[in-house]
Image: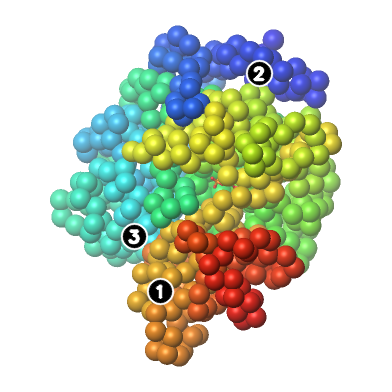
Amino acid sequence: MSYYKINNLEQYFKHYNKSIREPRKFWGKIAEENFVWYQAWDKVVDFNMGEADVKWFVNAKVNITKNCIDRHLAKRGEKTAIIFEPNDPNEETLHISYNDLYSRVAKMANVLREQGIKKGDRVCIYLPMIPELAVAILACARIGAIHSVIFAGFSASAVTSRINDCECKMVITSDGGFRGNKTVDLKGIIDEALEKCPTVEKVLVVKRTHTAVSMKEGRDYWLQPLLYDAIPNNVAEIMDAEDPLFILYTSGSTGKPKGMLHTTAGYMVQTAYTFKNIFNHEDNDVFWCTADIGWITGHSYILYGPLLNGATTVLFEGIPSYPDFGRFWEVIDKHQVTQFYTAPTAIRSLAKESDEWVDKYDLTSLKVIGSVGEPINEEAWHWYNDHVGKKKCPIVDTWWQTETGSIMISPVPFVTPTKPTYATLPLPGIQPVLMDELRNEIEGNQVVGSLCIKFPWPSMARTIWGDHQRYKDTYFSAFPGKYFTGDGALRDEVGYYRITGRVDDVVIVSGHNLGTAPIEDAINEHPAVAESAIVGFPHDIKGNALYGFIILKEIGEYRDRDNLTKEINEHVSSHIGPIAKLDKIQFVSGLPKTRSGKIMRRILRKIAEGDFSNFGDTSTLLNPEIVDEIKDNKI
Ligand code: 6R9
């Protein structure tokens, strides 16, 4: 019996029970039967959750790109691996076959080696959604370099801190990127970022927008001529199962982003397994995930998961509203997409436009549609179901995180009955638990609590780059022996999970995780600002938006509040990126603080939501009178 594919509900329970009773046998069999290895493992898993120390497929040797590319060549060499759909619908679509992908990756890998990159070196990739992005990532994995992709919407200072944190030796970027009717000056941002990055020796630049850029002698090189001269063959580096594959930064509750480190074999096994099951992948499918590769969703489900299964994956450079609100549906129609995976924020923004945009395209190719990144509200779920899935495509509401590496809780389409707004059941191998405030596991159904995972899974992050203590403190200390997700959840009467949202200081805006601390740090740097507190509040399209409570230094000096609001937002934009802009800014004379000096955010959250009904216990506040002032002046 194979455990790789779940075909019906009975089988789901069978696999699930096996995976709990005998996790080693379960994952061992999946790993053995579905991948190519240079050398098998001595042990399937070795762990100490208290120390946040986890190893999978101990001592096995493997290269993930051999599994993503080489092994498909004999049977599927001419099959399309990547469909590149450019920002401009009039520019030609590119179909990259597995053979073609092999030689592109081999050439890029050879260029990286020639430019001095070795196994273990960190390479920062700051590129728009173009084929070179996929190729650069795979080329790093090919030679054992650790890729650190930075979303090309981040500002120079955000790029600087991420490059310095993991001491990248090289940056791969482009002259610019297209986004709707705009071009983004990526090389300019990199130039600014690199003024403070001493470890970067070389910058390889892809020509995409043909904008004039400055090239620094001895540091910057155009990539295309180097690729032209490179050999289209490459022997993959033999990697240990636990050798790092990539670093991906995610927001935390302090100012410093967390470089989540993922390793090779466990990540490979579970992204492949989840892709196969959650998207019910079959050989002639065309899979499209609309995320940016700069986020974990793109890593796992544009690139690694699909390629590991020999799938055809769409790489879309554009945005849902360009040239009009029909773009997503036009692309589905054009490429006969069979699985479509997007975020609630995109669904909500398209649902508010006329239904004609979606109704005029042929979406009958679709089999499964998915959602990820934040809770999907009932209305958006139904619109997605009615207008996109035409009530025939199961919606997979997939819950997971940068830290988890791959999907953890989700319906398996055609297997698990779906329920609006519910991520439903854990995948085999995943053991979620709900915990109460006293750190006890809550048994039974129809309960609410903090979502934890009590047994390791193969694709979990292994550490925070350079700071294992922080990894332990953030994820393994709130509930000792368990991984704490930072999310709250409820479990309904049949055991289905519904994720209710973050219970920490992370706000999810348009599907982007934003730590409030780094935004506050940026605001506090503005010369007019004394102190600030940021909270999220519900927003129709974005899910959440940011509300800032700001104390100014010299109240009299800054009479032009509108201008100041604008200035503060520009400041946030340049420090973090436009995604972190505040929707509302209220200037206040103080913030509600506890005696130990902690801002009581739950009160600010309630005010921002417009819920003045019950502020709970305010007896520990040092300055309870401030609550009324803030409430009365709410915007
Ligand atoms: C994959 C990804 C992780 C956080 C996570 C949770 C929220 C993701 C969700 C969801 C409700 C879903 N989240 N999927 N909430 N339902 N289906 O998004 O990773 O960017 O690290 O965000 O996103 O709050 O903790 P990441």
With 237 as the anchor, is 372 left or right in this view?
right
With 266 as the anchor, is 277 left or right in this view?
right
Up the image or down, 343 lies above or below 1; here it is: below
Q: Position of residue 383 (x, y in %)?
A: 79, 55
Q: Position of residue 628 (x, y in %)?
A: 63, 77
User: Between tags 3 and 1, which lies in front?
Assistant: 1
Up the image or down, 484 lies above or below 254; here it is: above
Check residue 530 in the rendering and tell me which mark sits there, or answer none: 1
What residue is disc 3 on? 157
Q: Crowding at label 2, few (<14), some or many (≥20) Cα neighbours within 10 Å?
A: many
The Cα atoms of the two marked residues, 3 and 1, are separated by 21 Å
- The amino acid pointed to by label 1 is Ala
Residue at image position (41%, 50%) is: 257
Residue at image position (48%, 11%) is: 43
Mark 3 and ligand 1: say if the CB distance to the nearest ligand atom is below 8 Å.
Answer: no
User: Tag 1 or tag 3, which sits nearer the N-term?
Assistant: 3
- The amino acid pointed to by label 2 is Ser
Mark 1 and ligand 1: say if the CB distance to the nearest ligand atom is below 8 Å.
Answer: no
Check residue 557 in the rendering and tell me which mark sits there, or answer none: none
With 577 as the anchor, is 456 left or right in this view?
right
Residue contact between numbered discs 3 and 2, judged by CB atoms under 8 Å: no
Q: Crowding at label 3, few (<14), some or many (≥20) Cα neighbours within 10 Å?
A: some
Q: Position of residue 442 (x, y in %)?
A: 72, 34
- The amino acid pointed to by label 3 is Ser
Secondary-structure class at tag 2? helix
What residue is disc 2 on? 19
Q: Position of residue 260 (x, y in %)?
A: 44, 39
Quadrant in which the C terminus is drawn: bottom right
Residue 488 appears in which quarter of the rendering? top right
Secondary-structure class at tag 1? strand
